[in-house]
Image: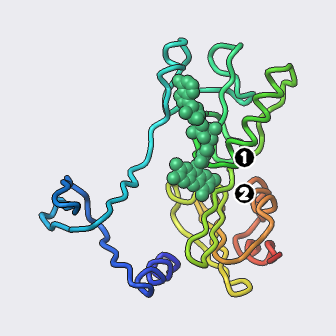
């Protein structure tokens, strides 16, 4: 429902969306870009923006002999397989207290993990427990925030309408695994608390988070 509304906002301002299409190749001719799709269709444009994701840059860590996988593997203190080297930010793969071992690409994660890694380098021995980093985006006049697991590992969702916006509770094995807000501002630390200590029944989920 929200995905449809989100897409419609773009359609309303004249954007054509082509879903379930994969790019095959592109070429530039006479200052025009031609993008060929896998289904054979060719799209012509003045500008092509490639949004194709990223891979963590682990070569330096590998060369230093650190354990790498999806990013640089670290423990709950953000200490890598070499106890003198710590990892933080996008490259960090660590055991998140809410989601489990994972790697995130979010500004908030980079900030918090950087601070903890820094403190631990000076002997703090602090467990990194800022679980489920906040992701956010603002597009058109839509503001979205989320914590937890919102894309994979979910089998249902509860949508609560609040103050003209929505709160979505993603569920995995009957428990909230992620919380997303759509055009409503709530205390996201409280949302994190719900993921750590969910109410006994799903009926009690809605109404906990209040608009601020
Ligand atoms: C287009 C885009 C949009 C984004 N939007 C959002 C958003 O809306 N919300 C959000 O929360 N996050 C967003 N992010 C993610 C956010 O920018 C990152 O999570 C954050 O910048 C990660 O910080 P970092 O310090 O770990 O890595 P980076 O900011 O990538 O910094 C790593 C630095 O290390 C340097 N480096 C790499 N290899 C070496 C080497 N061998 N030697 C020396 N230096 C090296 C790089 O040049 C770089 O300066 C976005 C990212 C992109 C690309």
Do tag 1 and tag 2 residues touch (Cβ < 8 Å)? yes
Mark positioned earlier in the residue sequence (1 or 2)? 1
Identify the residue under disc 1.
131
* Residue 147 horizontal/vertical position (percent): 67, 58
Identify the residue under disc 2.
195
Figure quadrant of residue 134: bottom right
Quarter in which the C terminus is drawn = bottom right
Figure quadrant of residue 194: bottom right
In the rendered view, tell whether residue 95 sits above or below residue 208. Answer: above
* Residue 117 horizontal/vertical position (percent): 75, 29
Figure quadrant of residue 142: bottom right
Residue, x 19% and y 61% (percent of image)? 34
Residue 91: mark: none
Residue, x 71% and y 13% (percent of image)? 84
SS under mark 2? helix
Residue closer to the observer: 179 or 107: 107
Q: From this viewpoint, which residue is outermost toward the right?
A: 124
* Residue 1 horizontal/vertical position (percent): 50, 81
Residue 196 relative to residue 27: left or right: right
| Residue 45 visible | yes
Instruction: Give the number of callouts.
Output: 2
SS under mark 1? loop
Residue 121 relative to residue 132: left or right: right
Residue, x 17% and y 60% (percent of image)? 30
């Amino acid at each position: 429902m929200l995905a449809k509304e989100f897409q419609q906002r773009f359609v309303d301002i004249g954007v054509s969306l082509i879903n379930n299409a994969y790019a095959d190749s592109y070429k530039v001719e006479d200052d025009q870009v031609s993008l060929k799709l896998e289904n054979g269709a060719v799209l012509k444009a003045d500008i092509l923006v490639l949004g194709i994701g990223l891979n963590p840059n682990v070569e330096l860590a590998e060369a230093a002999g650190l354990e790498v996988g999806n990013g640089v593997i670290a423990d709950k203190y953000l200490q890598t397989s070499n106890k003198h080297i710590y990892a933080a930010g996008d490259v960090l793969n660590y055991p998140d207290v809410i989601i489990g071992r994972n790697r995130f690409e979010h500004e908030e994660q980079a900030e918090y993990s950087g601070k903890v890694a820094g403190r631990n380098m000076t002997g703090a021995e602090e467990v990194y427990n800022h679980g489920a980093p906040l992701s956010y985006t603002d597009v058109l006049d839509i503001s979205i925030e989320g914590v937890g697991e919102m894309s994979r590992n979910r089998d249902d969702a509860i949508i609560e309408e609040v103050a003209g916006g929505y709160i979505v509770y993603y569920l995995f094995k009957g428990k909230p695994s992620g919380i997303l807000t759509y055009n409503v501002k709530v205390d996201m630390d409280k949302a994190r608390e719900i993921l750590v200590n969910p109410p006994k029944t799903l009926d009690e989920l809605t109404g906990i988070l209040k608009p601020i």
